[in-house]
Amino acid sequence: AKLQRQHNNQGKLQQHRQTSSIKGSRIQRQEARKTEGAPYRQGQVVEALYAANKWYPGVVTRIERLNSLKCNDRNFSFHVKYDQKTMNYSVIKHLDKIRRCPDFDWCEGVDLQPLQVDDIVLARYEHARGEKAWISGKIAAVVVDLIGLKEACYEVTYDDGDVEKGVKRGNIRSERDSKEMSEKETTDVSEMESRDASPREMEMEMRQHISHYMSDEKER
């Protein structure tokens, strides 16, 4: 009887997990349908107009489908959390007040390695305030999130004497990054040239390889 009860309990537990999984999948599908067709996605880095007609970087934290068609042509509102800590959230209801942030395109596809103290770098000074300029400096300190909820950030001492804390890795370029970007560009060009080769060129190249191989065999 005891074994039977244990078996029944295991069956109920397994059934509960399956039911929870099905409910979770259903909720995810419902949420996906709510944001289907939205021009931006949750978690995407964007720029939004906050005050004084200036664009500030932030992250889309929530997307809502609106009932009113007057808000924007795609009927969505976007909750934006700004990188600048002293700024509040914004709810953007007009597409002309939000845009994609291209500032991190430079590191797309590049594996950014952790930096160390005294590394010579270029960093965007006060990027969270909407600034774009790259300024030379060096890493003064590394701040690591021990809980693992956030990526490491850096304290940068600029050559002009200014110091900035909490700089994101995507706002810092090192010499190592430049080498990896150069290697990636070379690889991309090689792959593109390989794909662009016509079937006729590939056939001729294959014939040359076979001819060389046959010549070597005869000499042996």
Image: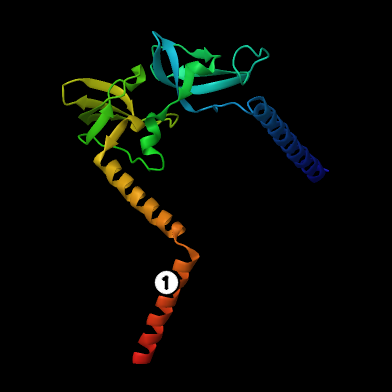
Pick whichever, 26 or 107, lies toward us.
107
Q: For the view shown, which residue lies furthest in the front direction? A: 200
Pick whichever, 33 or 139, lies toward us.
33
The structure residue drawn at horizontal position 50% and vertical position 17%, both measured from the top left corner, is: 96
Report the residue marked by disc 1.
Answer: 205
The structure residue drawn at horizontal position 47% and vertical position 71%, both measured from the top left corner, is: 203
Q: For the view shown, which residue lies furthest in the left direction? A: 160
Q: Which corner quadrant holds the N terminus?
A: top right
In this view of the protein, can residue 176 be seen by the observer?
A: yes
Return the x and y of residue 208 as percentages of the image width and height. Answer: 40, 76
Q: Look at the picture and state if 146 lies above or below 217.
A: above
Q: Which corner quadrant holds the C terminus?
A: bottom left
Q: Look at the picture and state if 20 lies above or below 194.
A: above
Return the x and y of residue 44 as percentages of the image width and height. Answer: 49, 28
How many marks can you see? 1
The structure residue drawn at horizontal position 16% and vertical position 22%, both measured from the top left corner, is: 160
Pick whichever, 189 or 12, lies toward us.
189
The structure residue drawn at horizontal position 30% and vertical position 47%, both measured from the top left corner, is: 182
Pick whichever, 190 or 196, lies toward us.
196
